[in-house]
Image: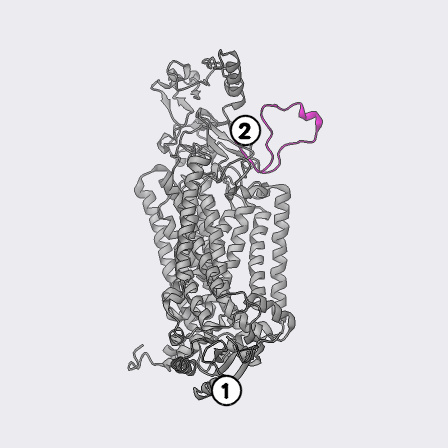
Amino acid sequence: MRGREMHWIRIDRYYDTGLKTQEDTPAENPELANPQTFFQPVPCQQCENAPCEQVCPVGATVHSAEGLNDMVYNRCIGTRYCSNNCPYKVRRFNFLRFQDWETPSLKLMRNPEVTIRSRGVMEKCTYCVQRINNVRITAEKEGENGASRGIRDGEIVTACEQACPSEAIVFGDANNPNNRVSKLRAQQRNYNLLGELNARPRTTYLGAVRNPHPDLAGPEKKEPA
Amino acid sequence: MNLPHPELYGLLGEFDSPERLMDAAKKIREAGYRRIDAFVPFPVEGLSQALGLGRKHDLVPLLTLIGGLGGGLTGFFFQVWVNMSSYPMNIAGRPLNSWPAFIPVTFELTVLGGSLFAVFGMLALNKLPQPHHPLFNVERFKRASNDKFFLCIEAHDPKFHLEETARLLQSVNAQHVTEVRDED
Amino acid sequence: MSAGDTHVNSPEIQRLARVIEPGHSYATVTDKIASIVLTRPTSLGWLAGFSIAFTLMMVLMGSIAWLVTKGVGIWGINIPIGWGFAIVNFVWWIGIGHAGTLISAILFLLNQKWRTSINRFAEAMTLFAVACAGIFPLIHTGRPWMAYYMFPYPSTMGIWPQFRSPLIWDVFAVSTYGTVSALFWFVGLIPDLATLRDRATNKAAQIIYGMLAMGWRGSARHWHRYQSAYLLLAGLATPLVLSVHSVISFDFSIAIVPGWHTTVFPPYFVAGAIYSGFAMVLTIAIPLRKAYDLEDFITMRHLENMAKVMLATGLIVAYGYFFEFFMSLYSGNKFDVFLVQQRLHGPYSSYYYALILCNILTPQVLWFQKMRTNVAVLFVMSLVINVGMWLERFVIVVISLTRDFMPSAWGRYQPTFWDWSTFIGTLGLFVSLLFLFVRALPAISIAEMRELVHTSEDHE
């Protein structure tokens, strides 16, 4: 694969043997057989000061008013500069034509709401922008006098949030202090990935509080805005 | 003006060194001729002064300044207009008018404008390209791009007189004097 | 030079000080240089060299065709190494071009007479290097047929390029650089084209050179404006050449990648560009003067001066390397400190040591005049520096990307066959253009050489 996987959410794994340096880790060390495992799902962090946006020569990745880091596939010419400048390296590129457009039986398999990208185009997690828009349209239809009724907290469910069995992923409007996501973000455990770069990512994580008993380590929480 | 020789362009004197040419040019100017030009295979220092070409003769620096300022100002304000008025977008949380980021393009367009105006201004003022010129009818004139130095007194000059002017050219050490004719 | 000093008047010193060997007149200079183009028969060596270069150029064409057919995935790039050989080669070629402009513009403003016989082909080299460089930013994009999005044209979508991106600065810097270099070169050529027109005996050559010369006849009025245009172009090209590689370095220093995000880059890139450019001028000049018996015009003084420029810029580059490391360590930033460790001990450390050997250690022999005046040593040295400067760009562009912020996203880079074929193909394009140039246009400025004959007559 040579670093060309097309997944939008990378599950990072880190291992801790408790040993300090490589010299301490002879192959027969029993600690190596069963290291403590950490993992962290990393999709696009939707930075406010997005490093990717600044370097795109054609404005193919820009900010929306809602705080999304939008990727405009039609505009993308594929310089890959955005990926180089992404500290999280969460952007994915169609190095070749990875899609099969010809086989008719495969056409029905695809999600009609997520357009298939051709080769030479950068792509990334969109916070399921199609689901956001569906809910927004519903909210507008159900509103009165032409005004939207407003999107309720928890009404938008992203694909990753939906799929996570332990409900570790929470999505919502971070500007509303009463939302679930805002309350979680207010916790002391809340942190930004690589916060010192001041990219101001909208995706934040809650530090895991681990029970000293190694079998009961809890999952991490991540709640996008 | 009623010219005695309508097809005559002028008289061409040939010299074998830039010093002789300069000497001749000074003397011919002193003799009152004004419509004269020299043709040399490389730029000779002092020749412009000897022919009486002043600073005002040269508009190239002014054109370059206009081109450079025009290019730079257009470049800068175009970027401001694009980002603030034509299609404002939130890019990386930066201000719409991120003027420091517009400086490189402004600089490059300043240089581009100045250079284009300098070169094309120079060519236009020199009335080049000019495929035909009476001087090219003179076989010896080919050496103007090699090792000989020429001085031409045009027939338009009020003092021009075929025999007298030819004598004058010979008296200032021209090795050859040729009549330049504009034939079709 | 003081005449009373016997040491200064020694024949050896005089030999090294000459910019043109004695015994030349206007006519012999014209003959010698114009005859290469007009009368000299095409030699077997030229045909052989051109055939090889042309074959390599076809390799480039083939590689580009395959690239457009399949996509940039035929190269070794991946996530996280989004930029590979294409950008390395782009920066390398643009850097090589810089020597030509430096010689033609900066040395002209500094009134360095020794530039005269090398400026023409150095400028040609600039143009051809920019041509090779310009291919890469275009073809390295995922969708090269959409590259026109980077130009500010009024589109139906109403959208414009994103002027905060250094890549847009590149578009303007490189296209301005190419245009101004071409103008400068062409303006310098006009009088010589007139010479070729007047000396050509075959009709086709007369017509072609005649059209290119645009009716230049050496009028003093024309020369007057010509000289001020040339001087102004030199004045404009000087800041331009400094800006171009600075802008190229912004591609990296604007980004946040450790190893890229460094304020020392602009001056260090410019010095590196001139360094590699002079190396390339020597690589071309040494065979050229041999093949066409131009030792009278491209003298030992030229070669030695170029060696001195290489030594000086090489030391600036060494300073850049030192401060890159020093600032990384001094900053205390853990990613920058890690970068230094990676350079020295990481999986790609051998490239770094090769780079130090090529760019810093070996060129120190240029301190010795014996070495600077030994043509073979200079030729080898120029090749070593060319390789070293290529490695420098490889270390900066590729190796910095292999290990940046998050260990989970680290990667490796392995160039593929197509990476190499595209790079070698541009070498073929470059050499092909040079071969055509020496046969079609005067490789040395005849008009300026006449001027040099004139002024050296004054002194003797």
The residue beneath circle 2 is A7
Q: Quadrant of residue B94?
A: top left
Dot 1: chain letter: B
The residue beneath circle 1 is B163
Mark whose residue sits in front, 2 or 1: 1
Residue B11, above or below A131: below
State the extent of the magenta-drawn residues as a range.
A95-123
Residue C319, above or below C33: above
Please rate how many residues cluster around mark 2, counting C-alpha atoms within 10 Å: few if below 14, some from 14 to 19, many from 20: some
Is residue B29 visible in the rendered image? The answer is yes
Dot 2: chain letter: A
Which x, y percent locates residue B88?
44, 33
Q: Amino acid at mark 2?
A: His
**C201 sits to left or right of B152:** right
| Picture quarter with the C terminus of chain C | bottom left
Which x, y percent locates residue C231?
40, 64
Residue A114 within the magenta-colored segment of the rendering: yes
As rendered, which of C221 and C316 lies closer to the eye? Answer: C221
Q: Which residue does the image show at 42% across and 76% down from the upper left? A: B34
Q: Amino acid at mark 1?
A: Glu
Q: Which type of secondary structure does the marked residue at label 1 adopt?
A: helix
Which x, y percent locates residue C311?
38, 62
| Picture quarter with the N terminus of chain C | bottom left
